Each structure stands twice: as C-alpha cells, then as structure tokens.
Amino acid sequence: MKMISRIKVLVYTFLAATLLTGLTACADSDDAIEQNTLDIPKTYTLTVEAGKGSDATRALSLGGADGKTLNATWAVGEEVKVYHVTNPDTYEENESQYPVATLYAQSEGVTTTLSGRFVDTFTPVAGQVLRLKFNESPNYTSASQGGTLDYIATHCDYATAKITVKEVKAMPEITYGAGAYVVTPTAPAQFENQQAIVKFSLYKGNGTTPLMTNNLTVTVKKTIYTVTSDAPASEFFVAVKEASSKPVTLSTTVNDVTYTYEKASVSFEKGKYYAINVIPRRIITTADTNVTLYDGDVVSGTGGANTRLFIADNATVKLAGVTNNSFTGEMYDSNQRYAAGIECNGNATIILADGTTNTFTGHWDRAAVYIHAGNTLTIRGSGILIADNTTNEANGAGIGGSYWNDCGNILIGGGTIIAKGSQGAGIGSGSNGHSCGNIIISGGTITATGGSNGAGIGSGNDGSCGAISIDGSAIVTATGANNAAGIGCGGLSWNRDIANTCGDITISGSAHVTATGGDYAAGIGSGCACQAANTCGDITIEGSADVTAMGGDRAAGIGSGNVNSYSDNPSVSSCGAISITGGTVSAMGGNYAAGIGSGSYGKFASIHITGGITSVTATRSNNSSNVPIGKGNNDQGSGSITIDGQAISDNMTKGTADLPTFPNLNVAISNGYNSDDGNFSNGTWIITKQ
C-alpha cells in the first residue's frame, strides 16, 4: 500500500508540470486547453480494540463447564459492520441503513483488533456515534433455526457495540500515502448480545415424560421463529428478540397431531438465558370428527356436531377445558347413535386440570363418559367433570355403561364430578340387562343422579354392577330415580324378568356420604323388585365415615327396597349383611320400612352395630308398622340383629321389650310424630359411645 501511494504521487506531480508548461508555450494560440484537477479520494481507516462479550452480556446458556455455551472468542477474519448512528440516545441509525465500513478481526481470542476502511461516500468526524454489528443475519430476525446451541453460535449470535469517534487524524503521506486518515474511538468496543436465548423443554401431560418432535414454531410478539431438528428432540434452543410483556405461542406436530402452547405475557431481556418447561395441548375444534387422544395429551376446546372423542388404550390424558356434545342431528342417525361424549378404547386415566370445567353429553345408546367392558377408567385431578346424559334420548349412564353394553371399572380419586344418567346410573351401568365393573371412589366431590330406574351410584335400569367402595376424603351425594337406590341397585321395569344386582357396598375412611333413594328404593342398598330379584351385597360402614341415608316410600334408609306385590310373580328386594363398625350414621326409612333394615316385603341378611361407632341414628316413618332398626312391613325372612355384641329381638325393635345392657354403647329412644294420633313411641334410636 505504501509503494502504490508513492507512485500515484509521482504521476500526479509529473502530470501537473506538463500541463503547466503547455499553457506557457501556447498562450497566444486559439486552441482551448481544458485544465482538470485530479480528485484523490481520501482513505479513512478505523482500528478498534474489541471484546467479544462476557457471560454477563452474552446469552450464554448453561455455563462453560458443561461445554454448552456460545463461543465467546473471536476468530481471525470475522466481519463487523459499522453503521452511523444519528441519535445516540435512541440508538437510531441513519435512514439509508447501509454499512459505512466493514471491519475484520485481526486475531483470535476474547479480545481482538477490528480493522477496516470506510466507504468513499462517508466522512467521519469527531463526536460521531457509530454502531458496530456482529453476525446480523436473517436467522436471527425470523426464518429458520436449527434448535441447538451450536446452530445459534454459528448463525444467530447477533451482538452490537457502540463507539464514539474521538479524532480523525491525517497520516504522513510519505508513510501512508496521500489522503490517508486514521479514525480513533474514545474507548474500546464491548459487544453485547441483542437477543435472548430461550430453551423450550417440551413434556407430555404428566410433566415428566419428554414430548419428542422434529419441529417447533415459536411466535413472540409478531415474530415467527421456525425451528427444525434433524432428529426428534424435546429441547429446542431459540434465539429471540428482546420483548417486554408480550404473548408467546408455540406449536408442534407429532404424528399428524398438532399441539399448542400459549402464555399471555412474557418478557425476554437481551443478553439473557431463559429455560421454560412447556406442556403443549391439543385444541379440539368444531370441525373435528374422529379424534383419538394419546398418552400425555393435554386437551381443551369445543367439539362440533360430528366430533367424537376417543382415549387410546393405556393413555393418560389431561382435560383442560373440553366440551363435547356428541349429538345435534337426528336421533336415529347411524353415525351418531353410538356416540359417547368421550369414549375409552381401553384402560384410561383422565386428569381434570385445576380450574377447568369439562362437559360431556352422550346420545341414545352411549354414556356421556363410556368405558368398555374389561377396562378401567381412573379419574383424578382438581378440575370439574360434568357428564350429563339426560338429553338426546340417552339410555346410558353419566359415567360408565351404555344401552345393551357392559362397562368396566370406574375409579375416582379427585375432582368435582357431576354425573347424571338417563335410564342409566349417574355413575355405573346403563340400561337393559348389562353390567359395570367395580366402582371405587377415594377422593373428590361427587354428585351422582340416576335416570329412570337408575341408581345414583350403582346399576341402571335392568342392570347390574360390581362392588362399590367409597373411602378416603371423598364427599359424595348420590340420588336414585324412582325404584332405584341412591347407592346400590337400580330398578326393574314392570315387564322384564331380569335380575338387578350390585356387589358389596363399603363406606370407610373419612368419607362424607349422603344417599337418597327414589320411591320404593333404599338410600343405600337395593331397589324395587318387580318380576325378578333386586339384590345388593353386604353393606359396611367403618372408620370415621359420616353417612346420611334416606329411603324412598316403602324402602329402608340403609338396607332393602320395596317389592311390587301387584306383580303376578312377586320377588324379593334384599341386601346382605349390614355392618356398622365405625363412623357417624343417620338413616331414615320410608313408609312401611325400617331406618336400617328391610323395606316393605324386603329382607336383609343380618345387622351388626359394634362399639367402634361414633353414633348411629335410625328413624322410622310415622307408620306404626315401621321400626328404627330391623324388619319392615311384611319382612320376607331377615336375619339376626346384634348391637355391641348383644342380640336384639323383634320385640325389642318394636319397643315392646326392654333392651339389654350394652358394655360400650348407650341407646336412647325418642318418640316421633304421627299425623293421625299425635305422638308415637319408638320413633328414633340414637346409639352413641358410653
């Protein structure tokens, strides 16, 4: 460069001398000679000492020890563009937005010397503010990213620095050539990253199992970042612009299923690293038809007229605000006749997301929430589930079985559950001779109401169910329809010779239970028997459970229901052994029925009340045929009664013989009110610890 400059000077000098001689010699000539002044461009060079950045100013991810940091050192030849800043306070560049210089790193390391020359059209002056930009690329502003730290280090490591021109000094011509100037900044440049780095970790609904995918679309504010990975991954590193209180949305597609995530307000500060754990969810829309939910799915949205929801076998799904009414068309539409609100294709677990309401409605043959026979549905969480099967001419349960279809086991461990059946149980079997498995409730707040001839919890019209267990801290309110128990057996239609049964009923732990039977059915126990038997298993109340049971007309509060004596083939409504060994119990029978025992023409296997109870209150109705504890009107051969180990005779239950002395319990007898003749005796037995 020095030699070339000297040659240019000699040439320019020689040319000027020749022109001058020519003018002198031809002064009187007519020839016009044009005199040109050669414009020699000035060369402005800029040399800056520059730091690549530190952990505090760069978006380093996890620290250097594990090797997962961005490269914070310079490489020889790396380019830095220089822009003129017109407003130092706001960092605005001039409107043309073209670089006025390009600098190159002269050495490698944490610091380097950046050196280069200004373009010919720009003349720097002292006091000017210049902005230096390193690695600005389309990948940073939007477009595509690779999702790894290595990709960000090589494609998206966008950093800037600001310098102020201290002086512009002409250099000696003999050394640097004519027109050479050196621009000196007031201080070295310190680069700072202009983006944040965000690590998005994707998980399935349980929050621990990674969600593997090859793609991720991230929208921050209005900028869209499309991230693509060569191999399936659950962690994606994304370089994003600085943002303050802006919405963020994510979406990814796995096996043709789209998952999304939304956060209303986030802030990303440049030069900082963020880690966000994400559980994307599926959004159900009115345009969806057959939708299968897979293990780990988090689901929200509203289905349409033709939306059918299925849960894959052995899948755990989280419902986070889902509504699906399975029917809006013709009642006999073959495509919708068998449509449940949501249907389990095998074993399934539903988690009710906190603060959400999830509503399902079945149609005609299907339950609102349907579990196939031989499988188990588990429901837990803290959200709300409404399974309302009282519309659409439905014959299935709210949760459980369908018309002419058996169902599997039902386990409820949490949530607020509102279940209503139509000819089926609120929770249990559907209508017409089919069964459900065991029903286990260990938590949550449950309100279950049976449809026509359907129990609140248990079997539906002409149906059966397995054992029923309520324990833990569950709060249960169960109401049966006419002929059906609150908890236990449903009723039988008048012209069907189909037995209605349920298994053993156990209430324990600290459960709080209120059960009300429909007319002719027990609060807890069996329903009305018409042309075939209506039978439930043993009834056990233990622990510290709090139980209130009210029988319908001619049915016990706890025990058996009524028998239709007008039938040509009357049968028996019965229950197994009634055992109360703990807790607080209040039971009231209907007309012609005991508070605890048998209904009209019904029977029980035995009654045992032990010294472990807190209290038992049994009340008969005002009909003189009733007793608080024991046999109702026209009892069909009930078994023995023992209280605190002491045998209780029929005369004692009727109040015509003295009770024995009890070692651990007190029995207080009070009178009730008879609308015909005033007070009557032996209306209520109150049994308490001594």
Image (tube, helix red, strand yellow):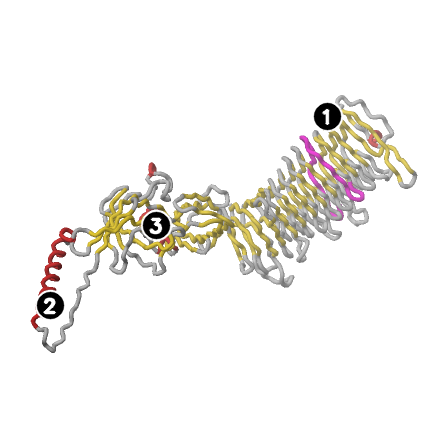
Magenta residue check for 554: yes
In the rendered image, residue 29, in percent from the top left (x then y), is placed at 10, 76
Q: Are marks 2 and 1 in contact (CB under 8 Å)?
A: no
Mark 1 sits on what residue? 611
Left/right placement of residue 106 relative to residue 662 reads left
Of the image marks 2 and 1, the number of the one nearer the N terminus: 2
Q: CA distance from mark 3 to mark 2?
A: 54 Å
> In which quadrant of the rendered image does the N terminus lie?
bottom left
In the rendered image, residue 180, in percent from the top left (x then y), is placed at 19, 54
Which secondary structure, mark 2? helix
Tell me, for residue 158, which label it has, or none.
3
Q: Nearer the viewer, mark 2 or mark 1?
A: 2
What amino acid is labelled 1 in the image?
Gly
Of the image marks 3 and 2, the number of the one nearer the N terminus: 2
Magenta residue span: 528-555
What amino acid is labelled 2 in the image?
Leu
What amino acid is labelled 3 in the image?
Tyr
Q: Quadrant of residue 612?
A: top right
